Amino acid sequence: MLLISLLQENNEETLTAVTEEEATETLYENDDGNAEEEGPATSPTNLSSLPVKQLYKTYLIKKIKKCDLEMEHFKQQIQKTKIEILLLEHQLREMRIHSKKKNIVVAVLLVIGGLYVINHCDFLAVFARSPETVHHKLTWQADRLVSMESWIDQADYLSFNVSYQLLAGVLPTQQKYLSVGLSSVKRKKGSYLVPTLKSIFSQSSPEERSFMVVVVLLADFDVSWRVDTVKEIKSAFASELEQGHLLVIHVPQDWYPPITGLKRNFNDAPERVTFRSKQNLDYSALIHYCAGLGRYYLQLEDDVFSAKNFLTTIKKRVEEQEGKKSTWATLEFSALGYIGKLYKSAHLPLLARFLFIFYQEMPCDWLMNHFREVMTQKETILFKPSLFQHMGTFSSFQGTYNKLKDKDFEEDIYTNPSAEVYSDMSTYQKHFPKLAWDAGEGFFWGRTPEKGNYLTVVFAEPTVVTGIFVETGSGGKDILESGEVEMGHNVVATDKEKSCTEFESVGAFENGKFKMQELDKKYSSASSCLKIKITATQKDWLIITKIRITTKPTLPHQ
């Protein structure tokens, strides 16, 4: 009865719950292993009439058939899984084959690219460098000496493709201390390029010339003007061109972006906008070319006069600034326009692109100030006296009259070393003795000088003095009527001041001024003091406007 109950209670979920139709169609194997047709005796209505043994046999047959169905299902699942594994293996083989083909293609392309570069480069050389001064590899790229100091050049970020034509000069094979850049165009009135170049070279010693290279960009699109200008330069500077101290280049017009029809910022006339926009592009190309030529870059215009030994003075100022360990992007050696601005060569790739990107926005000297601020230098660093003076009378823009002059320029630039200054004369207000020694507009103003009074300069280190210039008075008043200049040795200190124990007169004042050159030929040993001595009492007060000396220059290492 228990088996009957189980067969009756389980409907579709058990093997005993079959319909009458299923009972007539289901086959099972008997004890002899032969298939028999399952008759109506196993239907639900007849289950109670079957003997227990037959009932149990029917139950087992149903159970076995269910297991067989489940096994068949498992076999199908296993077969399906095997097929999926075969498909995955096939895909993996295809991927490996494709990867090998891709690597072969990449390798072939690299070989072809390398051969192309080798066959199409005009220059592919690596130059030797001094570990003391040049800290990065130098290489020629597109006829341009490149130092890998800038992150832009290291991986050719922000590609800047400029085509240059070398019109005159010999390309340098190593980096100099200073590169000097000038851009020149055809002027309606006058030409100052050759006088500017003569000033640069004549105001520099042979040693100083060996540490710099001057690059002139002839930026005018007038071919005949360029040809004539190159001839003139070759005639006047044959030696400088041959020795690699002077290069003349040109950038073709097709490199330039549009320079007409630009927006008129500041309500400038269209002609003015075109002029200043092209000037920005000229400077951009020039600066880009000079990026690897020197450790530092000096921007000049083509109508300036240079002070004597300006390179030595620049080197001294750079060393002073580097000693402060403060961030700087621009050092200014003139207050005028885009004259006398010094940059680190590592910054030039950035500056070139900066001028190019914003070429139509504003004049170059304005952009220069923005660049300085972007490079985190907040304040202007301007040195006095100025090293460069504007000489042009007529502007390169439409030949207009230009009387711009730098009031702080001194033709004979002096290299006053660090020193302390003392005087026994009574000082008027805040016009202290040190102001006459320091560069700038300051001066010393003393009350009623008497015979024997003095002003003494005590050098921080013994110095070989080569020249002295002292100027007194203002507007013809308060000049030194009688005095002399003495050089001293052996510094001694008292409670109030320092001086020297031995002095030797080198000359007397004339008309309130003292000027002497080539002192080292007569006084070759180093001096420690310079004294201005009053040799006669005078009624007027005394103004000492400036005390300037020159010393033997200490040149930078290549």
Image: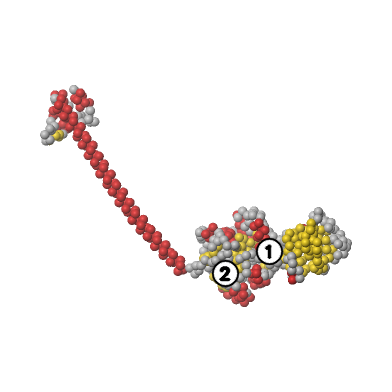
Amino acid type, callout 2 = Pro
Location of residue 482 by image quarter: bottom right
Mark 2 and mark 1: Cα distance apart in space: 24 Å
Q: Which mark is residue 521?
A: none
Residue corresponding to mark 1: 313
Determine whether, in the image, residue 527 is placed left or right of residue 85: right
**Front-lying residue, 339 or 527:** 527
Taking the spot 63% from the left edge, 56% from the top edge, the residue there is 328
Location of residue 105 by image quarter: bottom left
Circle 2 crowding by C-alpha within 10 Å: few under 14, some 14–19, many from 20 = some
Taking the spot 57% from the left edge, 69% from the top edge, the residue there is 172
Is residue 78 depicted above or below 182 in this figure?
above
Determine whether, in the image, residue 380 is placed left or right of residue 150: right
Amino acid type, callout 1 = Thr
Measuring from the top left, give residue 264's x and y in whole percent: 60, 59
Residue corresponding to mark 2: 172
Circle 1 crowding by C-alpha within 10 Å: few under 14, some 14–19, many from 20 = many
**Front-lying residue, 201 or 417:** 417
Measuring from the top left, give residue 94's x and y in whole percent: 32, 54
Taking the spot 65% from the left edge, 71% from the top edge, the residue there is 206
Location of residue 49 by image quarter: top left
Which tag, 2 or 1, sits closer to the chain's start? Answer: 2
Residue 240 in sight here = yes
Measuring from the top left, give residue 400's x and y in whole percent: 67, 67
- Disc 1 secondary structure class: helix
Taking the spot 36% from the left edge, 55% from the top edge, the residue there is 99
Measuring from the top left, give residue 365's x and y in whole percent: 63, 60
Residue 18 in sight here = no
- Disc 2 secondary structure class: loop
